[in-house]
Image (cartoon, coloured by chain):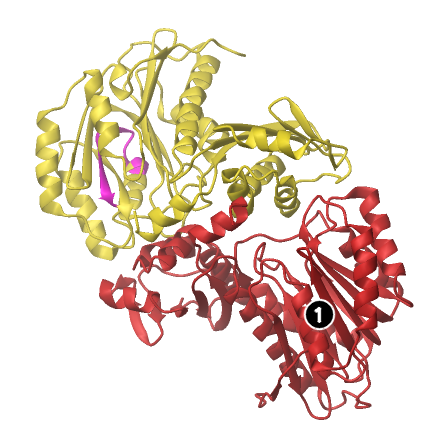
Chain colours: A yellow, B red
Amino acid sequence: MVIKIKELDGGLTEVQGVKASGITKKGKGLAFIEGKGKITGVFTKNKVKAAPVRFTSSLLKNVDEIDNIILNSGCANAFTGEKGEKDVEWMSSLANGNTAICSTGAIGTYIDREWIQEGFKETKSSLTTDRKGSKKAAEAIKTTDTFCKEIAVEGSGYRIGAIAKGSGMIEPNMGTMLALIYTDLELGGQELDEFLKKSVRETFNLVVVDGETSTNDSALLVSTGKSNKTHEGLEDEFQENLTYVCRELAKMIAEDGEGSSKSITLKITKSKNREEARDAIKKILSSPLVKSAIYGSSPNLGRIIAALGRSKATFKEDEIEMYLDELKVIENGNIIADQEDIKEKFDKEDIKAKINLKAGNHSLEGWGCDLTPKYVEMNAGYI
Amino acid sequence: MVIKIKELDGGLTEVQGVKASGITKKGKGLAFIEGKGKITGVFTKNKVKAAPVRFTSSLLKNVDEIDNIILNSGCANAFTGEKGEKDVEWMSSLANGNTAICSTGAIGTYIDREWIQEGFKETKSSLTTDRKGSKKAAEAIKTTDTFCKEIAVEGSGYRIGAIAKGSGMIEPNMGTMLALIYTDLELGGQELDEFLKKSVRETFNLVVVDGETSTNDSALLVSTGKSNKTHEGLEDEFQENLTYVCRELAKMIAEDGEGSSKSITLKITKSKNREEARDAIKKILSSPLVKSAIYGSSPNLGRIIAALGRSKATFKEDEIEMYLDELKVIENGNIIADQEDIKEKFDKEDIKAKINLKAGNHSLEGWGCDLTPKYVEMNAGYI
């Protein structure tokens, strides 16, 4: 099924039953989302899970519905032991009802309770169903992000709205970033879960910025049910709309990769299976040599092939084909394009590559970015 | 068994029965080693194996002894199809007898036969058992290497001598670089093989520069037997000497990581098993965030813990301990050292870190380097 996507301006607050706000002060941010609804979530697979990840995933096991989400940026509250646990419980108690918590920022530092308390009061008093509310929340959860990430779509009588953050420590092992998605379609817990997992698998799980998997990654999907529309007969449409929302956020995250100057869309076709295609995408898009070459528009296809060779993908060296846009650059394992033509394709800000493995019938697309001296300087603390 | 290592000046030509020479011209290099002997080798596990890797590994299956090794730098002869195969056969036919071939350089380019032929003539006429011969060969196989890598040790009546190259595309999956090791101890094919595999596992396999695995990695061990000394009773000593030689070369490769400004020695102690320790070392030493932080002496231990959390290592977050030199920086999962003290340790050119996982009894050491803007610039083609 291919549906026509109807994108709206705005984000979270396009959805009925959702209020949002956020503030940023002294390099820290806090966002508050109010909106009772059924909830599901996917969380980082890193063994070191931040206190808010442990808290929220445990909350979701015990309750079907939540009332609010509080997010803070500037402190990840990860690797913070018992004090971190107490801090997140305390944060959750600031709001009435069941409150999920997401945090992002430096690992191994404690939250500043005084700052959080004041920030919470301020956001609570400014909660709004207005478009600005979502924008403020998206703004508040930025860390090294250079732009706000929000999106909303309109389905048949319901809406989906979302915000996300992410630009460094990105290689979602199921959502390496924060993403909050609300919908007003009526959905039960089990259905919600299946919809989210399926969309995440095709989107956030295929973004690579730097091959890292953070301690704090969380993607939450909440259904307020306020559209009074049930999902009966709308399953396929809702799934497509949700996947669209997640994919657009995933692309924004790739595009906003720390220090990046170019984004890369890589499609693997005719792979033996999905897992091999995914591994090929990840190995290529996380290769420092490939990413450096693309930064410099160095027409070094050999590095892409070497990265492919390190992956689990099945292929015969003398059969593979590769395209940059519509230009065939590799045919039957031979580089057939001119260096100058390859360089011209790599010079673009939005590079589209396709590799045909001729080993099966699976296709998969993933998103990444180049590696720049700025990435290193930012993470060295020099910027 | 712990033996006293007796290191000699020089490299390959310290070994009886070995002549060497090399030349470098117009950004390309060629080395020629003459020395009849039993041979074994380990090769890249990348699915895209360079023509010389396929040729030499196939040669080693068919013969027990070789007469020579020719190495060239500047062209990897990888991803070069049938032409590449013919080129390597032709290269091998330049010398008399059985000749192994190793290549390093750009992938997807063909060798320049004219250049190779002239280079070969010149090196052949200048072959020598003198120390300078080994030095010239080590010099000729450099690509982005900033210094020559050679070493020799003296055992009980025999010697081991070696040269290596490697600084980028380094994450040996069993020898991601070129290493040639000769000994004059009398050893049969089977023994040779076991000695080499064991030493490689503890040394080259634990170096990470950029997490890449090249198409050309090869480590060859040749026994000329010219010392007229058999290995009986010397097994342990020989193994230790060989491991020492490989470890020193591995450390040189890490120290010479492309664009790097610091080297890192990471020891994992009390790991559940060897494989988990190895994975922890690899995940930490290949993390762009950890490597960028170390470049900038940013005291961000959280990134090291997040990388550890992505590894297969078993540990409890609230039990781990970490040291920088003798300074305990993490105790029972809490960061206990001052930021300034951590920064001071990261400011050193040779950083020594130790993480105690308290999960078993295995210890393992690995070597890496920082990630710098220069690495990116070099691989972008801007330097």
Q: Is residue A356 left or right of residue A350?
A: right
Q: Does dot 1 land on a helix, a strand or a loop?
A: helix
- Residue at (36%, 54%) from the top-left corner? B303
Crowd tier of the residue under label 1, counting other residues whose Cα lies within 10 Å: few below 14, some 14–19, many 20 or above? many
Where residue B153 sits in the image (x, y, percent)?
Answer: 65, 84
How many numbered dots are placed on residues in this image?
1
Where residue A351 sits in the image (x, y, percent)?
Answer: 53, 29
Tell me: residue A297, above or below residue B96: above
Q: Is residue A65 rendered magenta in the image?
A: yes
- State which chain disc 1 sits on: B
Q: Is residue A375 rendered magenta in the image?
A: no
**Region of the chain picked out in magenta, as a range:** A60-75
Q: Pointer 1: what residue? A: B137
- Residue at (43%, 33%) from the top-left corner? A254
The answer to whether one can see residue B152 in this image is yes
Tell me: residue A269, above or below residue A379: above
Q: Is residue A271 left or right of residue B209?
A: right
- Residue at (43%, 67%) from the top-left corner? B359
- Residue reaching furthest to the top: A157
